[in-house]
Amino acid sequence: MASSDTATASATYQEVFANPVFRLLFGANLAAVLGTTLRMVALSLLVYDVTGSAFLTAFTYGIAFAPQAIGGVLLGALPDRLRPRALIAAGHGLECAVGAVMALASMPIGAGLLLVAVLGALTPAFRGATSKVIAQSLHGDAYVLGRSLVGLTMSGGQLVALAAGGLLVAWLGVPGALLAGALCHLAAAIVVRLGLPNLPVEGRAAGTVVRQSWSGTRRLMKERAMRSLFLAQWLPPAVVAGVESLILPYARIRGFSVTAASLLLACLPVGMIAGDLLMGRLVRPATRVRLVMPLMTLVGIAFVPLMFEPPTLVCAALLAASGVGNAYMLGVQGRFRDAAPTALLGQAFALLGTGLMALQGIGPMVLGALAEWTGYGAAVGAAGVATVATAVALWPGWSRSTAPLLTGAAQTPEK
């Protein structure tokens, strides 16, 4: 791969959207996020209406995410074996088919959830292909801003779909909401199939998909630099997801009003959006690299005072500050793209997404169990300490790996 792009001149969001491939995938991704979230809301409400079980409702919410851990490890090589246009369009097409079948066919809830679980196992391959094409289409700082925009789109799209999902179910019924979600995926599939260039596959496949995926995963995780980059993007988000799951019970234990609890719940995502926009627009690429570990430390440090039960506005400010700290990702993403072996670029993104989804599911469970033992405030404080410890542990390796970038020396990642 070429020399690192992470320390090049700053790009603008206008430059990112000027790229036709990114613009197309951005739109398709937005439609897909809306469709997936609508399906998730409709299924969760259906399961709760039928069973009355909070556990089964939560299980339904997570059924599409847990199988990704299996699919990412065993099928992660698909983005490096198949043409991206066909793979991405097939992914959206399958999403559409599953939603349409559940909407139009009379089938048991368990069978529908099984379809969603199988689809979840394939998701890392589809998303890995999308991430690979974006990485190959955008260069330098434009890639970092593009990845930031994709993340903001997913967060914003999920918030909109979650807010509108209940209204759509009430208006259209569960089958109608499922069909609306399927149509979103159909639109994404058509846009990709008709608009995305039929890019070639680099290299030749060796062995079966499962064998290549397993060997590629082992190779990626064996390299210390790649392992650190994975952990930097996996562990803090897992902790943040865990803290998010405790905000409402924390507010309830503190005796906060419903309005105050809602305010606290919104502070983290608002801080994330603000941090990404500020870092993307006002901070130079090389400075973002220098700020990675300080900002990661901020993510955790901001949680620690919550264990001392500060006033509501202080809690809100701390949660917003932690969200701003999440902008450390902008300094990591370009380095990750540069360090990934060219032959495993698609699999590297598939594995990144797999670990992120799996650990964001595990984080709330671990912190929830800890909160039952220590109390909510102590659990949130422990989460902050764990994030700071992660930054401290990764800091020396990060400083060594980025030194050539910050001094202007060319660096070609080891393959």
Image: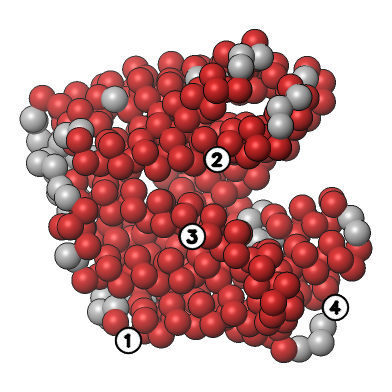
The kind of residue tagged 2 is: Ala
Label 3 or label 2, whichever comes before in sequence order: 3
Q: CA distance from mark 2 to mark 4?
A: 36 Å
Which quarter of the picture shows residue 308? Answer: top right
Q: CA distance from mark 1 to mark 4?
A: 35 Å
Q: Are marks 1 and 4 in contact (CB under 8 Å)?
A: no
The kind of residue tagged 3 is: Gly
The kind of residue tagged 1 is: Leu
At label 3, counting other C-alpha atoms closer than 10 Å, the crowd grade (few under 14, some 14-19, many 20 or more) is many
Which quarter of the picture shows residue 309? Answer: top right
Q: Residue at x 53, y 60 (%)?
A: 160
Q: Residue at x 89, y 68 (%)?
A: 50
Label 1 or label 4, whichever comes before in sequence order: 4
Left or right: residue 33 compared with residue 202 = right
Left or right: residue 245 compared with residue 341 = right
Q: CA distance from mark 1 to mark 2?
A: 38 Å
In the image, residue 183 sits, relative to residue 76, either above or below, namely below
At label 1, counting other C-alpha atoms closer than 10 Å, the crowd grade (few under 14, some 14-19, many 20 or more) is few
Q: Disc count in the image?
A: 4
| Element type at mark 3 | helix
| Element type at mark 2 | helix
Q: Which residue is mark 1?
A: 194
Q: CA distance from mark 3 to mark 2?
A: 15 Å
Q: Residue at x 41, y 85 (%)?
A: 190
Q: CA distance from mark 1 to mark 3?
A: 23 Å
In the image, residue 116 sits, relative to residue 222, either above or below, namely below
Which mark, residue 55? none
Which mark, residue 108? 4
Label 1 or label 2, whichever comes before in sequence order: 1
Q: Are marks 4 and 3 in contact (CB under 8 Å)?
A: no
**Residue 350 appears anywhere in the view:** no
